Image (cartoon, rainbow, N blue to C red):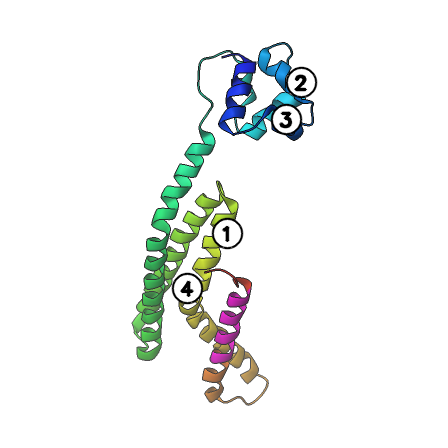
Amino acid sequence: MTLGEKITDLRKKHGLSQEDLAITLGVSRQAVSKWELGDATPDTDKIVALAEYFDVTTDWLLRDIELSAPESKTNSIASVAEMLRGAPMLLNLTIGGNIFGAALMIYDLWQQTYYHIPTIVGLFIQVGMCTLFLGLCSSIQTQDNSTGQQWQQRYWRCNIYALALMPSFWAASITLDILAQCFPVSSLLLLPMTTVVYVLVCARMHFVTRGVR
């Protein structure tokens, strides 16, 4: 295919008239017509603009080869669709995993087990769930940034309750220990402080991810 034939083929596949393409590229309709008929060749900057607009390479445009236009965008859409099909199930899996991890840490806090193995296991589970799903979001973002960010926000909105529970307790406990070195502080304040920190963290996350369903 010649350059003119490729421009014609791409234009028609995108449902554009010569006038539409001319307006997009900032040239006259007659210029587009001449390109397609082979009576003229686009300037270098217009070839680059054509390649970017139609999501093809300049090399493909300029080489006289009988190949269809690269399917990078089609393949990109297909791969995003495949990842999105598994996203809801993976999100549910991470919710369950994070809740289980939080439950192990609460059990350890209650029973004060030797070496705090449940807490360690619970932390590993939660870190693994975060890494797994946020890795998927990053992969989606490389091809569709907006969709990837939406799923990332959805993850935090759904999982913040399980993820913030023990860090809120640890933050309140450390704060009380520091205050106790300067003032007489009752250990009974630990639960209210934990609750306040937990509510603030969850509310903040809901505010940041507002509008996400």
User: What numbered label is drawn on residue 31?
Assistant: 2
Q: Which residue is mark 4?
A: 159
Decide which of tag 3 and tag 4 comes sooner along the chain: 3
**Relative to 43, is 155 above or below?**
below
* Three-letter amino acid code at the position of disc 4: Asn
Q: Is residue 43 visible from the viewing direction of this image?
A: no
* Region in magenta: 195-207
Q: Which residue is mark 1?
A: 149
Q: CA distance from mark 4 to mark 2?
A: 56 Å
Task: Evaluate if marks 4 and 2 touch, with contact meaning CB atoms under 8 Å apart.
Answer: no
* Three-letter amino acid code at the position of disc 1: Gln
Q: CA distance from mark 3 to mark 4?
A: 51 Å
Q: Residue 102's x, y, as percent?
A: 36, 69
Q: Residue 101's x, y, as percent?
A: 34, 66
Q: Which image quadrant: the C terminus?
A: bottom left
Could you say which is closer to the camera, residue 201 or residue 113? 201
* Three-letter amino acid code at the position of disc 2: Ala
Q: CA distance from mark 1 to mark 4?
A: 15 Å
Q: CA distance from mark 3 to mark 2?
A: 10 Å
Q: CA distance from mark 1 to mark 2?
A: 41 Å
The residue drawn where x is 49% and y is 70% is: 202
Nearer to us of marks 3 and 2 is 3
**What is the crowding at mark 3: few (fewer than 14 residues within 10 Å), some, or many (at least 20)?**
some
In the picture provided, is 155 more to the left or to the right than 28?
A: left
Nearer to us of marks 3 and 4 is 3
The residue drawn where x is 45% and y is 53% is: 151
Classify mark 2: helix, strand or loop: helix
Nearer to us of marks 1 and 4 is 1
Decide which of tag 1 and tag 4 comes sooner along the chain: 1
Q: Residue 30's x, y, as percent?
A: 67, 18
The residue drawn where x is 44% and y is 28% is: 71
